[in-house]
Image: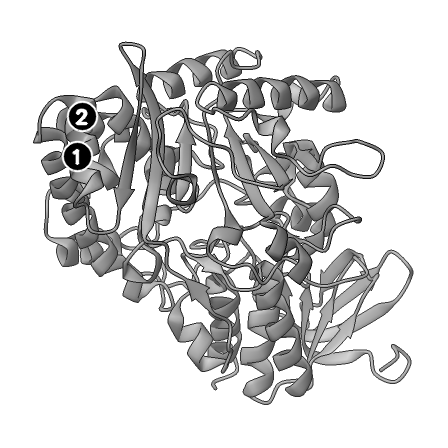
Amino acid sequence: MSVSESTYFDVVIVGGGHNGLVASCYLAKAGLSVAILEKNDSLGGATVSQKVFPEYEARLSRYSYLVSLLPDQIINDLGLEFKTIERDVSSFTPEKIDDKDLGLLINRGLTGKTSEDFKALTGNDAELEAWKSFYADVQKLADAIAPTMLQKLPTRSALKEKVGHKIWDEIIENPLEQVLEERFNSDLVRGIVLTDGLIGTFSDGKNLAANICFLYHLIGNGTGDWKVPVGGMGALVAELVESAKKLGVTFFLDSEVNSISSSSSNSNGGENFITTASGQSYESKYVLANFAPQKLAKVLNTQPPKSLEGSQVKVNMLLTKLPRLKSGADPKLAFAGTFHFDERYSDFQRAYSQAAAGKIPGVIPAEMYCHTLSDTSILGADLVTKGFQTLTLFGMHTPANLFENDNSGTKAIILERLLNQLNQYLIDPIETCLAKNSDGSLCIEIKSPLDLEEEIGLPRGNIFHKDLSMPFREDGSEPSWGVETDLPNLFLCGAGAIRGGGVSGIPGHNAAAAVLEARGL
């Protein structure tokens, strides 16, 4: 459909990422006319699979890469066949004690090798028991919060009463470092727990920003399991696009919105007028903003929200084989879950202090995983036969400001540092395992926070768009879906909404619900 054929829609969604696609499906199912305006020439945003290394048939989840927060209800409501795979191994962390290479393998049952590793690393069973007790208590938060994510925000007091346990104060009210230092003794174990509070969040354990990040990493579908998307992240987008097309959603690509204005002609906010950089214009009753609140503020000519900047680098790799480990652990187990290295509690504290002072951390906490150990469908058949694998690495406490003066130079320093750190735990240096292009270059790429801002619109590389918020509203505040803005008919439907962030579809669902509620549907 061309613009000249129809410029009016019930709802215009600005941004064709997965949340916008989810919202479009719910709204179109309800009988509304819906258009998606996407600034790029393809849909998906951060939720894409791409052929990162052109000479190889390997479609990597280039940006977002694991799934936890996507509710099963959305999959069922929209009739999607998108599948994920549970990982039997939660994590592996190599460690050197008294010049001896060891490792901590944490499996789902916390038995067998996990029990042996805890004892070998800590000298007794106390730390494993502390782990079991802590996460059993965290489960009480997940049980209470997960069912509310697709509903209007509960109040603080109602949710606290529902949890009914001291874990509320430990995670919601007090700094995360307090519960870690009270419950665990091991520097390594404290760090493994803390990592879920710092992925994508430039903070230390003293700031409640870490608590909120931790919470979001542990509540997905009530289990907190981080699962591998079959076919890569692009498989989710492909299904959503197909569903949206069948429901009659209209797409306009290469359509970057530069202005949204609203008439005040009636109490409901009147019509919205949307214009693009190329001069096209649209009208709608409702607008859903599936992009960062900072960009929305620019479009509306209002004050942008303050937020922490992105603090991670993303490294994508294609390997001809997995490296062997000095600890003797089986690589197919060690890399099947999250592989932590240099993420001790003290490593995080030191790295944060250095980065906050404007320096590249001497030791950069990092973690990674191997998609292809769970799902080989992202590789061509010949690569599968040859035993190729992918690795995705997340380097933390590398905030955007470190890259401002020399983005490429800083990336080179950080990449070299990360690979040298990793190699301390490997028999086979990672460089010897990387596939090579025909020009001899290695199949490895690194994305800085500034790259993420330029390529997929993440403000200062913040993967959550802005600071995360607790998944409730304060007592006495107005009922809310967590997507409302100052304009009555304009709603957030991206990561910047309350309960946004991650590959979840939650803000897309909730923005659609807000529209349908306003329509009396």
Q: CB atoms at circles 2 and 1 under 8 Å apart?
A: yes
> Where's the N terminus, which quadrant?
bottom right
In the visual, does 394 lie left or right of 106? Answer: right
- How many neighbours does mark 2 have within 10 angstroms: few (below 14), some (14-19), or many (20 or more)? some
Percent x, y of residue 331: 43, 39
Position of 33 relative to 137 (above/below): below
Give the spatial CA distance, label 2 vs label 1: 6 Å
Which residue is located at x 38 percent, y 17 percent? 347
Q: Which residue is mark 2?
A: 120
Which residue is located at x 41 percent, y 58 percent? 69
Examine the image and state in which quarter residue 450 appears. Answer: top right
In the visual, does 94 lie left or right of 427? Answer: left
Position of 185 relative to 279 (above/below): above
Q: Which residue is mark 1?
A: 116
Specify the farthest residue to the front: 386
Residue 267 visible from this viewpoint: no
Position of 273 relative to 52 (above/below): below
Q: What amino acid is at disc 1?
A: Glu
Which residue is located at x 63 percent, y 33 percent? 449
